[in-house]
Image: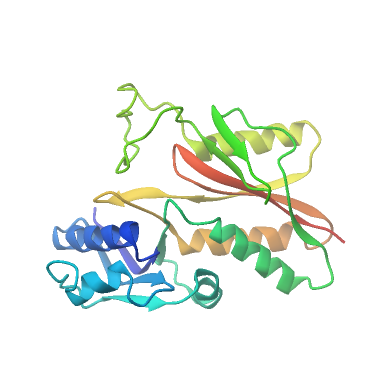
Amino acid sequence: MRERYGTIVIVGGGCYGSLYLRQLDRARRAGAIDYARVLAVDRDPACRAARLLAGEDGAPLDAPDARVVASDWSAFFDAFLPDAGDDDAIVPSPLMPHLMYEWLVRRARARWPGRRVESRPLERPPAIPWQRAVPDGTHYVSFAEWTCPINCIEPARCPATRGERTWSLPTAVRAYVEEERSRGRQLAGPAIFHCRHRAYGVGMFGADEVRAADQLVATAAATGDAEVLVGTVSHCHGALCVLSVGG
């Protein structure tokens, strides 16, 4: 069954964003997906996606429902997400910061201006083969201990191992939260933005997932201190953060 979307937002208009723009157009023309419009968001109004649409980077892309929005990503999502439709979706870039988590932090600070809102590190590493914590509190994880093909769609049979893909980060992250609770840590969530490959190699998650995460934070911290695990993940790779709301 063909999946249908309202607005699809592509994060970035460079090499990845322009590729996703072309692939979405091909997928729709082939009847694999349908959507009302595509917005490629980039601070550079002359980015590669804009050149593609204008015919300045090879053959022009005949996509009248696609355009480039010249904007900082954070400013764009501050305006877009609160009123986004349930059928809107976001195509992340492999090189972007943890944008949806950052949006949740800004929302929490606006909701509770007198409270302490901050990122905290994971107290215990999850049982995932590759991981790295960075100073801003983000914990990067991956089930791949090898170099993945850049266009991998994470099929049921892994192209690197040539065996069954028996892992999935959303499942692993949920199990991690349950383990932390069993150890006495009051960790809410997880709020998961699961980037699934929808058509022609384009992965995305729903804007409704982001708004649901915002509501989860609002509920968890409504009556007291709270910590919420937030993850933007695919089946194989992801970024995890703990959002803490104090008194």
Relative to 177, is 160 on the left or the right?
left
Quadrant in the picture for residue 45: bottom left
Quarter that holds the C terminus: bottom right
How many marks on residues?
0
Residue pictured at 29% horizontal, 29% vertical:
159
- 235 vs 13: above or below: above
Residue 10 coordinates in the image, percent (x, y) = 38, 64
Relative to 225, is 142 on the left or the right?
left
Residue 104 coordinates in the image, percent (x, y) = 63, 63
Residue pictured at 38% horizontal, 27% vertical:
165
Quadrant in the picture for residue 118: bottom right
Residue 206 coordinates in the image, percent (x, y) = 44, 59
Quadrant in the picture for residue 234: top left
Residue 154 coordinates in the image, percent (x, y) = 35, 37
Query: Which colour assignment does the render follow?
Result: rainbow
Residue pictured at 72% horizontal, 74% vertical:
110
Residue pictured at 51% horizontal, 37% vertical:
169
Q: Viewer-proximal residue, 171 or 126?
A: 126
Report the residue that reaches farthest toward the right.
Answer: 247
